[in-house]
Amino acid sequence: MSGLKTIPQEVRFRILLTVLNKGVKPKNLGITLVYMCMLLKRKKPISDRLLEKLLRHLSPQELIHLGITLKDKALNSLETIFPSGWAGSSAWQSARLASERSRVQIPAGPPNPLF
């Protein structure tokens, strides 16, 4: 998952918030509530392994909605995380095209509703 290393912590944090807002519990991510609190307070970084688990809970449309455009290396890593049908979907192709066409900064995410 070397491509995941290119995803900055700010983007990882927005992904975490999005997944939590979908109702995913810490135990579904393989972490404790205490560790989740440390992540939310930004006392611990979001690891590549946890990021992979978080991404499994998002669709390509949700990635686009978050305004996330990733470098090709990161996109290739994401394709290995998801089922083969997911990577070939039209939404995934749209995400790839959006990434190739736009090189703008990631907009600020919504405020953290948990704190």
Image (cartoon, grey):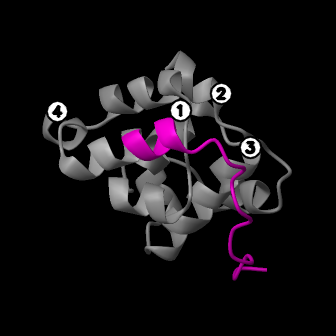
Judged by its main secondary structure, the magenta piece is: loop
Q: CA separation, marks 2 and 1? A: 13 Å
Q: Secondary structure at mark 4?
A: helix
Packing grade of label 1 (10 A; few <14, some 14-19, many >=20) is few
Which circle marks residue 9 in the picture? 3
Mark 4: amino acid: Ser
Q: Nearer the viewer, residue 105 or 12?
A: 105
Which circle marks residue 84 in the picture? 4
The image quarter containing residue 114 is bottom right
- Across and down, in percent, residue 11 comes to 67, 50
Q: CA separation, marks 4 and 2? A: 23 Å
- Residue 59 appears in the picture as rendered: no
- Across and down, in percent, residue 48 comes to 58, 31
Circle 2 residue: 6
Which circle marks residue 49 in the picture? 1
Q: CA separation, marks 4 and 1? A: 20 Å
